[in-house]
Image: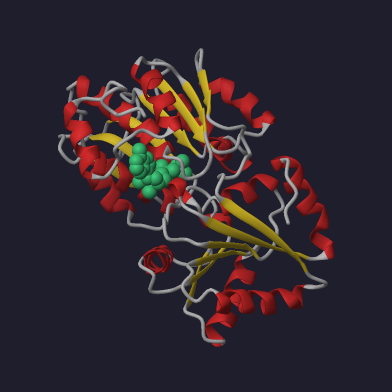
Amino acid sequence: MTTFHDLGLSKTIVDTLTALGFEKATPIQAKAIPLVLEGSDLIGLAQTGTGKTAAFGLPMIEKLLADARRPDPRNIRALVLAPTRELVNQIAENLRDFVKKTPLRVVTVVGGASINKQSEMLSRGTDILVATPGRLLDLVARKSVTLTQARYLVLDEADQMLDLGFIHDLRKISKMVPKNRQTLLFSATMPKLIGELAGEYLVNPKKVEVTPPGKAADKVEQYVHHVPGKDQKAQILRKTLTDNPDGLSLVFSRTKHGAEKLMKHLDHIGFKAASIHGNKSQGQRERALKAFRDGEIRVLVATDVAARGIDIPGVTHVYNYDLPEVPDAYVHRIGRTARNGRDGIAIAFCTPDEAHLLRDIEKLMGIQIT
Ligand code: ADP
Ligand code: MG
């Protein structure tokens, strides 16, 4: 067993971790932390729910503490980018737990919230900024923040950050961060073509892999229901939800509209359900996630906006009500359960139209789903 002390973290941080119940390092933490401390650029690949946030967060915090400089007003010392607002908030919460006994300040910047407040938060200078790319660029354009003092750039869910939806923003941002920086990329999946793009952002990177990329968390039990048509999906979902009254279930739908419709249907037939997708206001999204986290609602219907990174330890079931178009999304979706050594069940519904999607998923994962 590797302790955080063994990995070279200082007493302040180790004490904080002990108080948080982090006694030993997870495999990705044990591999990544020493390399980040020694200053390497890094690609870290490990399954969902295995502690990647601390794997980049802890050594970065340690290095920021070792170099006691305070950030200038409207400047930042480290930048963490993530694809969704919810994930940004979660990463920032984790980092704030870690820096509790230190003078470091963690600030978040996400769309859908007041830009003026964010600008004000940035005016004092920030040690670690956690952001979604779009809002960050808006704040840079307003001169609320400059990135020229950043010494660390982290891409969480790196393959998604390098993919079409984000690559343009990412190119702009990476040019604003000095070349002389340490860059860290983390994800549970890294398709080959996207991995090749990563090279542009890294210098002599080390690569640490805990399991082959694309593999699901070991403890997810996976099943598939073959259904003749879409209509049968709701019936089977209703039955399985009824059979597991104590479960906490996350149901993925392909479209925002479909998610909303399904949520209303479930609500109508007596389940405590909420939904989270891009047509909801940020306030609604956060309230839904919190109610689900607290167990007040037992079923959350979501689009892929909730597929990556979200850590709700109590999730027992993940339903792929619709199979995702991109097989990697399946790995991330089912990774919302069985976090950090727990158990979890993933159930997919597959109509004849979706059979090719199921084949792609099985091929990626190298398994056959029962
Ligand atoms: P990933 O990013 O790999 O999906 P997270 O960083 O979200 O995983 O961590 C998953 C869960 O495991 C979180 O609830 C986190 O608090 C917990 N965790 C991470 N590292 C440790 C550790 N060393 N000891 C105990 N719990 C940990
Ligand atoms: Mg993560």
- Residue 364 is situated, as x and y percent measured from the top left of the image, at 72, 41
- Residue 26 is situated, as x and y percent measured from the top left of the image, at 41, 35
Circle count: 0
93 relative to 176, above or below: below
| Between 287 and 171, the one nearer to me in the picture | 287
Left or right: residue 181 versus residue 163 is left
306 relative to 162, above or below: below
Residue 319: quarter of image: bottom right
Image quarter where the N terminus lies is top left
The residue sitting at the bottom extreme is 269
Left or right: residue 148 versus residue 174 is left
Q: Residue at x 60, y 69 (%)?
A: 259
55 relative to 258, above or below: above
Q: Residue at x 57, y 48 (%)?
A: 332
Left or right: residue 214 versus residue 1 is right
Q: Residue at x 53, y 30 (%)?
A: 210
Image quarter where the C terminus lies is bottom right
Residue 137: quarter of image: top left
227 relative to 155, above or below: below
Is residue 130 among what the camera can see?
no
- Residue 329 is situated, as x and y percent measured from the top left of the image, at 63, 49
Is residue 55 among what the camera can see?
yes
| Between 264 and 337, the one nearer to me in the picture | 337
| Between 109 and 268, the one nearer to me in the picture | 268
Left or right: residue 88 versus residue 360 is left
- Residue 313 is situated, as x and y percent measured from the top left of the image, at 41, 55
The residue sitting at the top extreme is 204
| Between 120 and 212, the one nearer to me in the picture | 212
